[in-house]
Amino acid sequence: MFSSEVISTFNDLDYNIYNYILNNGEQVIYMRIRDLATATHVSTSTILRFCRKVGCDGFSEFKVKLKLYLESESEESVKGMKEFAYEFMERTLKGNLDEVITEAAHEVVRANHVLFVGFGSSGILAQYGARYFSSLGKFSIAINDPYFPINAQQLDNSITIALSVSGESPQTVDQVTRLKEEGSKIISITNTKSSTLAHLSHIVIPYYATEERREIANLPLNITTQLPVMYILEATAREVYKLT
């Protein structure tokens, strides 16, 4: 409903209305034009001009389109989560995920140091993984700085758990290459076994989620679900806890 082409035509008042609608869409569809004008501190004529910019003849038509848009987004989200749950459970039950997680857990138990590596959204999960493993008794640290100083002595008998959806992130691949060269064993959690990161790894835990990409404000974004990563991290940490 709000394409990047339309958004690029917005002025400051339009952005104010747009942001309010994004945060209060469910309420806006039941508002009168005066209510929205009051809430956004603009005139009713400004609201009407905004409606025309997004392809509507008036506020009533805009509310109908907004309602349909919100319903379609909600249905798509629910459908997507159901498809993900079925897809992931199907592959988990039919594959050897548990065996690979157990193998990885044994390697973690034998290691003196556990390093988590990831950047972007994978960096956030690397921090979560380090905290979760530490809370279960295996002290770990997260590296999400591409210039993190690597000390060979500190990496003695270490294991690195690298996170990347594509397995092709230059920052992740560079960091993992350096860690591997210094003697750290590599476990990768990634979406495919055929990526560069996977080929650098001693153990690969792939989850094969269907990739999702969107473009927002002309920026390509990878929005592939990270829920399998959460599952794998927690399952591995719990297995490490049982083995120690």
Image (cartoon, helix red, strand yellow):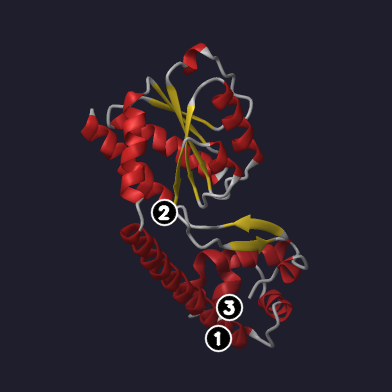
Mark 1 Cα shell of 10 Å, populated few (<14), some (14-19), many (≥20):
few
Pointer 2 residue: 227
Tags 3 and 2 in contact by the CB under 8 Å rule? no
Q: Nearer the viewer, mark 1 or mark 2?
A: 2
Residue 73 horizontal side relative to residue 54, left or right: left
Q: How many marks?
A: 3
Secondary element under disc 3, as helix, strand or loop, is helix
Secondary element under disc 2, as helix, strand or loop, is helix
Amino acid carrying mark 2 in the image: Leu
Amino acid carrying mark 3 in the image: Arg
Residue 68 at what x, y percent from top left?
53, 82
Q: Quadrant of the C terminus?
A: top left
- Report the front residue among 39 and 88: 88
Secondary element under disc 1, as helix, strand or loop, is helix
Question: Where 224 falls versus 189 (above or below)?
Answer: below
Q: Is residue 199 visible?
A: yes
Q: Quadrant of residue 85?
A: bottom left
Q: Quadrant of the N terminus?
A: bottom right
Question: Is tag 1's residue or tag 2's residue first in the polypeptide sequence?
Answer: 1
Amino acid carrying mark 1 in the image: Val
- Report the front residue among 28 and 153: 153
How much space separates mark 3 and mark 2, taking CA atoms? 42 Å
Pointer 1 residue: 64
Question: Is tag 1's residue or tag 3's residue first in the polypeptide sequence?
Answer: 3
- Report the front residue among 115 and 73: 115
Tags 1 and 2 in contact by the CB under 8 Å rule? no
Residue 174 horizontal side relative to residue 90, left or right: right
Mark 3 Cα shell of 10 Å, populated few (<14), some (14-19), many (≥20):
some
How much space separates mark 1 and mark 2, taking CA atoms? 34 Å
Pointer 3 residue: 34
Q: Nearer the viewer, mark 1 or mark 3?
A: 1
